[in-house]
């Protein structure tokens, strides 16, 4: 399930929804990304997230399909928020369910690494000293690259 | 220069638009309402007695645009294909800036609709806030940009600078730009600039006739954009990515008419 939305989400609710009436799932891994009050500058008061309607959803679907090819996954939920968010707000949710834990752990990381480097979202940070668009991070690309080297 | 709403005798006259060709028209208008900083704070915190002020004003603006013909005597009734109303809370000048964009494919311009949307959105803001502040002032209502139609494209001089300040509630705040005298009948490529790139170039959307491209691919489009408008020289600064019809593309990707080409900076979500 893929959603791009303004509204906040409840990770617990999404996970319960996913597991309802299922007894074949042995592992569920959930990752929630939050807005930090420090990043490129130390006093981030808010951020604004922009996306490219249509392409963003398609790109998330593609990343999910790749994860499903690599690991036997039962369920995947990807939720990303857009609009104005404040420190402490949840911004992204990835929940992965599988029969066994290793697949769920790895797929969750794979999804986040690729979401950060491929899905069309852009962050603008607001601080007391002005607003600026966040630059891409080398570390995020290195994180995503490690999945290329590991040939299963 | 003659006034089209007056006939030879100087009487009011509704222009017959039946013989004009239907083309894509778009207009953006802006305005502002200044208020006490305390009122602005209540508004942005959602603590005003009448509830969600901006949501109400947005609906009021959209509704008003659709009913412009009922208010302005010689305006035609139009089937607008798009009306958007956006707000920017400007704490520094203690005001709310309102912008409205109207679009249709038709025979008349839509600047009256955009102006009406802005005016009524401002009036609604006044109504929603007047319990706590009676000194509010509505002002600076004007057309920022207009595309399509016989009189050609128009971009208000100050609007070029204004688009550099983002309206955070809307990802598509910069007025669309028609380059190389494109008319709706011509085969065009539609260009979008997103996020940081949109603000850096000061262009949100543009359309370029396919026959202006030296080669029918992304590289040719970039070349055409740069020769048609200096602002696109910024496409060469920093890392700029490209998608054609929402699929990642490169300089060699072929283009045909009605393709949507988006340029944007590296992604930073998650």
Image (cartoon, coloured by chain):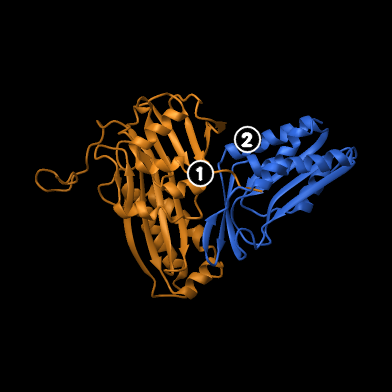
Chain colours: A blue, B orange
Q: Quadrant of the N terminus of chain B?
A: top left
Vertical position of residue B256 compared to residue B87: above or below: above
Left or right of B53, for residue B138:
left
Q: Which residue occupies 73% across, 32% down?
A: A66
Residue identifier under label 2: A58
**Can residue A106 be seen by looking at this rendering?**
yes
**Label 2 secondary element:** helix
Specify the quadrant of the image occupied by residue B228: top left
Give coordinates of residue A112: x percent, y percent.
72, 44
Disc 2 with disc 1 on a shared chain? no
Q: In this view, does B47 lie to the left or right of B2?
A: right
The residue sitting at 74% across, 42% down in the picture is A77
Q: Tag count in the figure?
A: 2
Instruction: Provide the residue designation for mark 1.
Output: B238
Cα gap from disc 2 to disc 1, whole angstroms: 26 Å
**Residue A85 position by quadrant:** bottom right
Q: Residue at x 11, y 48 (%)?
A: B10
> Is disc 2 in contact with disc 1, using a CB cutoff of under 8 Å?
no
Q: Residue B70 shows which numbered tag?
A: none
Q: Where is residue B192 in the image (x, y as percent from the top left)?
A: 46, 39
Q: Can you give x and y, in whole percent of width and height, for residue B6 in the image?
A: 15, 46
């Amino acid at each position: 399930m893929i959603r791009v939305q303004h509204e906040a989400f409840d990770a617990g609710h999404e996970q319960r929804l996913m597991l309802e009436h299922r007894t074949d799932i042995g592992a569920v891994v959930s990752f929630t990304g939050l807005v930090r009050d420090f990043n490129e500058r130390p006093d981030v008061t808010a951020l604004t997230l922009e996306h490219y309607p249509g392409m963003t959803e398609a790109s998330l679907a593609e990343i999910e399909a790749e994860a499903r090819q690599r690991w036997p996954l039962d369920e995947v939920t990807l939720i990303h928020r857009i609009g104005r968010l404040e420190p402490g707000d949840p911004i992204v949710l990835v929940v992965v369910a599988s029969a066994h834990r290793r697949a769920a752990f790895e797929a969750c990381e794979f999804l986040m690494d690729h979401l950060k480097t491929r899905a069309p979202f852009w962050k603008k940070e607001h601080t007391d000293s002005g607003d600026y668009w966040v630059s891409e991070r080398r570390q995020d690309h290195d994180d995503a690259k490690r999945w290329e080297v590991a040939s299963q | 220069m003659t006034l089209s709403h007056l006939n030879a005798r100087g009487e009011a006259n509704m222009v017959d638009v039946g013989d004009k060709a239907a083309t894509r028209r778009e207009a953006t208008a802006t305005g502002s309402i200044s208020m006490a900083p305390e009122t602005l704070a209540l508004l942005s915190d959602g603590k005003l007695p009448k509830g969600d002020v901006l949501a109400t004003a947005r609906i009021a603006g959209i509704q008003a645009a659709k009913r412009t013909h009922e208010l302005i005597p010689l305006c035609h009734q139009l089937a607008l294909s798009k009306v958007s109303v956006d707000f920017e809370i400007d704490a520094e000048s203690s005001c709310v800036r309102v912008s409205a964009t109207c679009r249709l494919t038709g025979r008349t311009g839509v600047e009256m609709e955009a102006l009406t949307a802005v005016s009524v959105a401002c009036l609604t803001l006044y109504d929603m806030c007047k319990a706590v502040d009676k000194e509010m002032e509505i002002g600076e209502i004007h057309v920022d940009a207009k595309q399509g139609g016989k009189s050609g494209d128009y971009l208000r001089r100050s609007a070029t600078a204004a688009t550099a300040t983002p309206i955070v509630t809307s990802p598509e705040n910069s007025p669309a730009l028609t380059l190389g005298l494109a008319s709706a009948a011509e085969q065009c490529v539609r260009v979008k600039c997103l996020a940081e790139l949109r603000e850096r170039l000061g262009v949100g959307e543009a359309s370029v006739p396919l026959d202006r491209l030296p080669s029918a691919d992304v590289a040719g489009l970039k070349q055409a954009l740069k020769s048609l408008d200096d602002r696109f020289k910024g496409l060469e600064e920093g890392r700029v990515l490209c998608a054609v019809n929402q699929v990642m593309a490169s300089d060699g990707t072929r283009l045909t008419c009605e393709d949507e080409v988006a340029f944007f900076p590296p992604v930073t979500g998650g």
